[in-house]
Image (cartoon, rainbow, N blue to C red):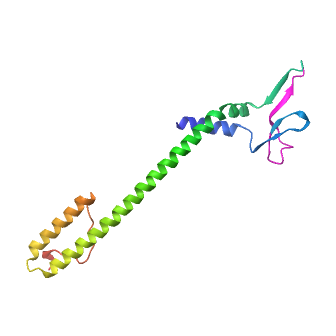
Amino acid sequence: MADRWKEARARCEAASPGPWKWWTSNSWRRLRADLDGGRRQPPVLMPTNHRSDNHPDIAVLDGDMSFIAHAREDLPAALDEIEGLQAENARLRSEKAAAVNFATDAKMLAERVRLYCAEQYAKSENTDQLWGETLSNVQALQGYIGRPLRLEYEAWETPDDR
């Protein structure tokens, strides 16, 4: 798909600059770049007659011809890509919101566990047993959220720290 977009981009860059505007005076329809009102720009697409036999034809540059010929395929493909990217963006935003909610819930749960353990630790006479229970609670919480916790609370002390 990346090659398709590179090719479409090359066709855009090879085409006459835009915007383009149709001119219809004197019974001749002409498509011109409308950069300065279109009057001094070379035509993008213009009817003509061959000098040798007066046969009608269209004057068009190769880059513009390729751009026009591929527009019917390039534009729908670009619109499909945009729609797909918008859908993916919406899905990723939803997943991000769910992850933020999950992280907030996990943080609140971790704080509740920390407060409970600190309270129990303060009441307990058997700090070695309580420390083991605290570590078990932290390990259970780590299993719940699916990743290790970083314990950064100053209130956490091991029995050896006393």
Indicate whether 124 appears above or below 96: below
Q: Is residue 148 left or right of residue 71?
A: left
**Eyeballing the image, is 24 above or below 141?**
above
Seen at 25% across and 77% down, the residue is: 154
> Image quadrant of residue 58?
top right
Left or right of 75: which side holds 62? right
At a point 83% along the width and 36% down the height, the residue shown is 30
Image location of residue 15, percent across then percent down = 71, 37
Total residue callouts: 0
Nearer to me, 91 or 46: 91
**Residue at (8, 80) in percent of width and height:** 125
Left or right: 95, with 111 as reference point:
right
Q: Which residues are magenta?
A: 32-51
* Residue, far top: 53
Q: Is residue 77 left or right of residue 133?
A: right
Q: Is residue 156 visible?
A: no
Q: Quadrant of the C terminus?
A: bottom left
The residue that appears at 15% across and 78% down in the rendered structure is: 121
Q: In the rendered image, which quarter is residue 130 located in?
A: bottom left
Q: Is residue 103 visible?
A: yes
Q: Position of residue 22 (x, y in %)?
A: 81, 40
Residue 118 image point, x, y percent: 20, 77
List x then y, in percent, for residue 53. 89, 18
**Where on the picture, by quarter, is residue 156?**
bottom left
Magenta stretch: includes residue 38? yes
Q: Reply yes or no: does residue 120 show up in magenta.
A: no
